[in-house]
Amino acid sequence: MGERIPKGWKKVKVGEYIKVKHGYAFKGKYITNEETDTILVTPGNFKIGGGFKSSKFKYYNSEYPEEYVLTEGDIVVTMTDLSKESDTLGYSAKIPSIKNKILLHNQRIGLVEFKNNEVSKEFIYWLMRTPEYHWYCVSSASGTSIMHTSPSRIENYEFYLPPLPEQKAIASVLSSLDDKIDLLHRQNKTLEQMAETLFRQWFIKPSPNLSQRERNSSEEAKEEWDEGVLPDEFDFTMGQSPPGDSYNEEKIGVPLFQGNADFGFRFPNNRIYTTAPKRFAEKYDTLISVRAPVGEQNMAFEKCCIGRGVVAFRYKYNKSFYTYTYFKIHPIPCGFKLSQMFN
């Protein structure tokens, strides 16, 4: 049977309505991790599935061409992906407003420019976050370990375009859902910060809200604590990657987590499965990335396989949330080596 296309929808190429502008090759010697008032937008600022990620910025510390300054609401796409699974290639993001910061249009980032008013900008933004579009970008990409797409490939993407009123209605529903998801994430972050505060009060220092008697008691208890190393309190499992031919997206076998690309707000995303797991994390184990960026943290929602980019920790004496909160308060630093746990 043929495709059932809604009335009024027509097959078009995205390049009929937009063009993708290359970014500027900013000089590497002026790119820094030290904060300045100028942020370079890089592929690292794209979330898996699309959307802007406001973390781990790269900064620029020199003059720049004004025509490569991005403005709030601009739609950009990533044209390079360093990950093994090409998690973000081609996906779109909208430039946010960041107080007292200028965002620059870096190379390998495409700026979406609209040719006419026959298409909704929001609809195109969401179109560029669909799995079908992402698969097109990945399957037509060049490269091996580093995948690349280009403006011309993106502009050749074909899809069915609904009439303008339907475009706006579809985009409105998706944007509303995205806003609600963002609100829930912010609420979860607030609750997590509250949990960390309570943890500090109970296990690190007395709360200023305690009575003097309670504070004295807490301080006396603290004096009895012994200094130790992590293996005294926690068991850990270092990940080991299964053979590549065991990977699948059909949910055959067990979930496989390789590192940051799989991590969500608290629990990882089940994207890849393996039929030949090597090392396991148990339910509620704390998962920590040991590849750059080192120290990113999640919690296993179920028994799962962990690859070599992940180490799983669990408190020896129970399976509560103690381990997860402990490592939130005492994050593993950049450059950390597992041998340091024993010193």
Image (cartoon, rainbow, N blue to C red):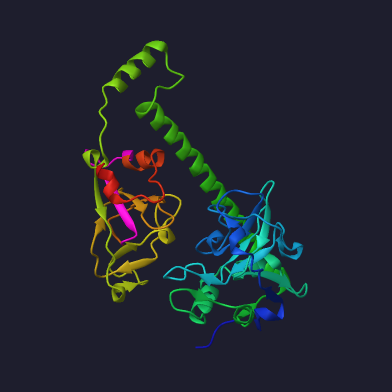
Q: Is residue 313 magenta?
A: yes
Rendering coords of residue 167 (x, y %): 68, 69
- Of residues 232 and 201, the one drawn nearer to the viewer in this rendering: 232
- 142 part of magenta stretch: no
Name which residue lies at 29% across and 66% down. 241
From what the image shows, is residue 191 above or below residue 174? above
Q: Position of residue 152 (x, y in %)?
A: 63, 82
Q: Residue furthest top?
A: 213
Q: Is residue 41 left or right of residue 47?
A: right
Report the number of discs: 0
Q: Is residue 6 visible?
A: no
Residue extending furthest toward the bottom: 1
Decide which of 329, 133 is in the foreground and name it: 329
Vertical position of residue 302 compared to residue 277: above or below: above
Where is residue 235? Give x, y as percent: 23, 46
Residue 61 vs residue 279, the one in the foreground: 61
**Bounds of the magenta span?**
308-322
Left or right position of 37 against 318: right
x and y percentages locating residue 22 in the rendered image: 66, 73
**Is 205 on the left-hand or right-hand side of 118?**
left
Residue 114 versus residue 296: which sits nearer the camera? 296
The C terminus, quarter of image: top left
